Amino acid sequence: MLNKKSYILILCGLAGLLIYILLRPEIEFYANGPIEQNRKQVDQKITEIAQEIGFSADSLAIVTMRRQHLSYVETIRDSANQNVTPAKLNNRGLHTQSWETVLGEKNGSSGVFATLDQLFEDTGQLKVNVSNSGQIIRLNSHPENTNPTFLTGDSLFTIAEYLVGDVFGYNLGLYNIVENNVQDSLVVSDEGQNSQRLLDNGGQPNELEITWKLKEDSAGLPQTLTLSLEPVVREFDNQDIFRTEFGYSINSFAALGEYEPVDLSKTATMGDDDGMVFTYLFFISVFVLGILIFSVGIRNIFKGKVEWRRALFIFVTIAAGVYGWRAIFFIYSFNPFLTNTGVFGSTINSLLFGLAVGLYAAFAYISWEALARSQKEKQVDIIDALWQRKFFVSETGTALVHGFAFGGIVIGIISSMLFLMGEFLLQGDSQFGYTEASIAPKLLTINMSTWTTTWLVCIAQIGFVYTILRHWVKKEWLSSILAILISGICITVLGRLFSTSGTFYQDLVIFVGVAIVFIYALREYGLLTVCTGWWVFSVFFMIQPYVASPDLNLAYVGWVQAFIMAGPLIYGFIAYRYGVSVSEVGDYIPEYEERIAQHLRVEKEIEIARESQFKLMPLQPPKAEGFEVYGFFMPSFEVGGDYFDYLLTKDETDKPSALTMSVVDVSGKAMQAAMPAVFTSGLLLSRMKHDCPDEVLSEISEPIFHRTDKRTFITCVMARYDLETRQMAIANAGHCRPILKRNGIAEYIHTPNPSYPLGLREKVEYKQELISMKEGDFFLLYSDGLPEAVNEKGERFGFDEVPRLIESIDTDKLSAKEIAQEIKRTVQKFSNYQLADDTTIICLKV
């Protein structure tokens, strides 16, 4: 909700905007010098001039982009004694910026370019710079590629004055010729006598250069004009007519102001140390941040902590935004110069780049959301509501308003720091430099660029960095400081949409200041506020070159984009005032949390079932003179289908009279077998203490048949040992045959038919076998988990090995418990502790 703290933030945001307005002449490259002509006008001008200088632009490919002459501005600042600001330079009409056009062969290259200079070197023929006011200030032909220009006339000076005065639009009456390396001459002669004056002794053309200097200093006019021409001879063969023409091609033209370099393509570069540090930090940031994001994201995927629809939306949106922007840029720049192979290569390159960035963004979101949700970060519930398409939420409106406030604060901080450093802000919207001005659908590409960058920077470089550090570093103040430093470094080398005239270290200080604001915003408010703030200040700086432009085709970009910016702010206030509370939307539980909660519930229920099952079995074996007994149960899963029990029956004088033992094995595993085992245990407990084994099995056969499904069957063996007579009565319902060891020899005990498992038939009359026990005898009941144990080679322990195992154990010296533990260790070691089936043992020593 908007409170006192919110209104303070809003005031601070307004103060930030006011600071920018006051400092704009000092720190904004386009202050008092917005772009005056759009690209279409420049291309039209170049096309018209092309006709005047001897060729048709329609026969060539053409690309025009904005060039910011930072090196020239820095030269002026270093040379001038007075304070030089962008506004002052633009007021004087100096060439701080221009349109740069490259003309070259259509479909002549298969390369992929990043700059106009690379394009010009590869396939360009002519490069032209048009000033902000629309005049030609540079023209250069490629020294090796075809020069398309060709001028003819009666006089060299007439040609030069026509070209510079009439075609390029300079008033030569304000200039004097100060340098001239050629005398005036006739160029065209029917006899060709005068044409030889333009050639040296070797027959090679001489470069002819003329320089004009301004008579009196006048603001907005270049100090010198320099034109370089080259004599050429052209032959034309048109059917039966062969014609030779003598003329000139333009090598170069330069309109130079004070301190202005001849080559405007030269850009100010970082010093060697700055450039090396920037490069190292760039690759380190990409590598480390990428590895962390993908590793944490993959880990959460394996844990199931991922909302796939959200991740897919982020992936598709970012990939489409990045690819779409690059595709539009190439269409309006390099594609006309490329062969079909080159166009295909650039398309694939852009597509792969877009997919990689989209994948990076999706993993960053997966990683951030899982960490933020576990840390109960603020505004996660608001973001959940947005994902549920619940937009008209009061807290969403509050988050947007706070985001605009933080955007204004960052604008003020950047402006103040640039002013204190004596630097200024330039446009740099992509790896290709400043490109938006040359793209036709600017409103589309500006928003594509700012939104994709906003999501990438805010989710990965701010949100993820802060949450992962909070996860690793328990002290919140320390994690915040580390997040500010790391985010500041990452923002400096990755993802920003503008540049400055300062050094790398100055930029680092500025963006660490920006990181302080956004890490605080993330801690106190949340990611939605951070994203809004980043978008606001990025768009704000990107529209400055269009503000106050005299060209409506450019000015509308600034005003319409400002209106677009105002939309979320107005919506924020409306949603805050009239929207529903996020609590009314309802708590959102992610699908993966529901799955985890369900798994936890199932695990808890299984654990309860496991505990309950073990509690149904005897905790301690019965004790009396004349025997030792001990049993155990090992499930192959958390719960199992085996069951064992032993009960001691006493007579009227409370003297032990009989020991009844039973082992049950239900078909199937885990919960499927556990429930019938529990049901059977109840039936056995109700009868086994007083009845004979054959009677018990015969009586419980019918209810088991009716209460279990047709696919379930239960094997059971029961034995009742009479302590006085030493008679052992054994009844078997399809279970493993018991083993008796006497005089060191272990053998299976035959039990009479029928031996149907319980549950197969409704009524079965089981019979029992009586054997006389002797002192020193060892008696074993077990489930099929023992003989069916499997080792790593897939070999079974086997029924034949069970008697041999009993014979190998010294049953005379060991207690019943020790014998049982020895059997347990043997089967576990054989199966490498991976039981194929539940294993149950009862050992009786007489």
Image: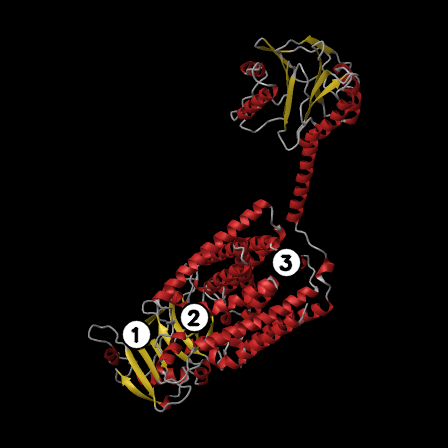
Task: Give me the residue at 25% from left, 81% from top.
Answer: 194
The residue lying at 50 percent from left, 79 percent from top is 24
Against 569, residue 720 (above or below) is above
Which callout, 2 or 3, points at the residue further toward the start of the chain? Answer: 3
Above or below, 780 against 87 in this view is above
User: Which residue corresponds to mark 3?
Assistant: 380
Does residue 810 appear to the left or right of 782 in the view shown? left
Judging depth in this view, the residue of 576 and 375 nearest the camera is: 375
Residue at point 71% right, 28% down? 616
Q: Which mark is residue 506?
A: 2
Residue 212 in the image: state x and y as whole percent: 33, 85
629 with respect to 440 (left or right): right
Screen quadrant of the C terminus: top right
Where residue 310 sits in the image (x, y, percent)?
62, 54
Q: CA distance from mark 2 to mark 1?
A: 51 Å
Q: Amino acid at mark 3?
A: Val
Q: Which mark is residue 232?
A: 1
